[in-house]
Amino acid sequence: MNIKIGQRRVVIIISVLGVVIKLPIIHLLRDIGMVCKHIVHWRIGAIISECAMPIDCRFGYKNHLFGGIVDNWREFVFFRKTKHPFLLPTYFSFFGLLNIQRAGEPCQLKDVDLWCQLYELTDGKVFDDSHHFENPANFVLEGRRLRMIDYGSIRTHGVITQYGKKIVETFDPSFDWEEKKKALRAQKK
């Protein structure tokens, strides 16, 4: 068993069963502290404006309290709707409070090789959600197929919907950015 802690979720990897359990991190004490600080300084407007921020806003109360729950639920619903071959399956969600996903072997590609190839395959659209696409820890390799394990963001859904099939069909795990640069330089000469 292995445990990883992200920004909004705790991931428990149970290799023996071949599953991953994702639990949301709820920053209740942090939010209570922020609200108390605003109240002490008579910044009621700050409380109201933070409550009005969208759930994906990194610094808002809703993100701290519910971001992990929303990410879990979005992963489950997106996989159920699309059954996309680029996604590692999310088998079950208890209203976002607990997700069960298939486990996979972590991707061992270099950051730069992964990013540059995904950039090429998506015509630069990975910049729409660079947080999820730049980190090899968000992917697994199954044979020569790249699969995504962290896909709770709506921005990620957009890239997957538009380019996921192309990534699944043409991704090359032996891609080397340094070799590609050399080849491009040789072509220009």
Image (cartoon, helix red, strand yellow):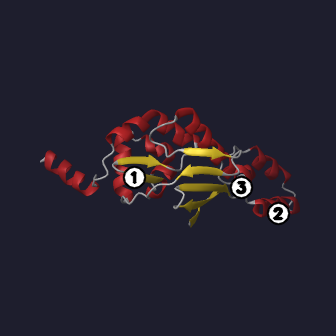
Number of the front mark, 2 or 3: 3
The residue identified by callout 1 is 141
Say whether disc 1 or disc 3 marks the residue closer to the N-terminus: 3
- Relative placement, left or right, of 155 versus 111 is right
Residue at 69%, 49% (x, y): give it. Answer: 69
Q: What's the distance in space between the residues labelled 1 and 2, CA to CA?
A: 46 Å
Which amino acid type is shown beneath numbered disc 1? Leu
In the depicted structure, whether residue 154 falls above or below residue 22:
above
Residue at 64%, 48% (x, y): give it. Answer: 72
Which residue is more in the foreground, 164 or 124? Answer: 164
Q: Which mark is residue 88?
A: none
In the depicted structure, whether residue 144 falls above or below residue 6:
above
Say whether disc 1 or disc 2 marks the residue closer to the N-terminus: 2
Which residue is more in the foreground, 107 or 20? Answer: 20
The residue identified by callout 3 is 64
Q: What's the distance in space between the residues labelled 1 and 3, CA to CA?
A: 31 Å
Number of the front mark, 1 or 2: 1
Which amino acid type is shown beneath numbered disc 3? His
Which amino acid type is shown beneath numbered disc 2? Lys
Q: Are marks 1 and 2 in contact (CB under 8 Å)?
A: no
- Relative placement, left or right, of 163 versus 51 is left
Residue at 59%, 61% (x, y): give it. Answer: 12
Label 3 sits on a secondary structure element that is: helix
Q: Position of residue 57 (x, y in %)?
A: 66, 48
**Residue 123, can we see it?**
no
Label 2 sits on a secondary structure element that is: helix
Residue at 78%, 64% (x, y): give it. Answer: 29
Q: Image quarter for residue 43?
A: bottom right
Image quadrant holding the N terminus, namely: bottom right
The residue identified by callout 2 is 37
Which residue is more in the foreground, 90 or 164? Answer: 90
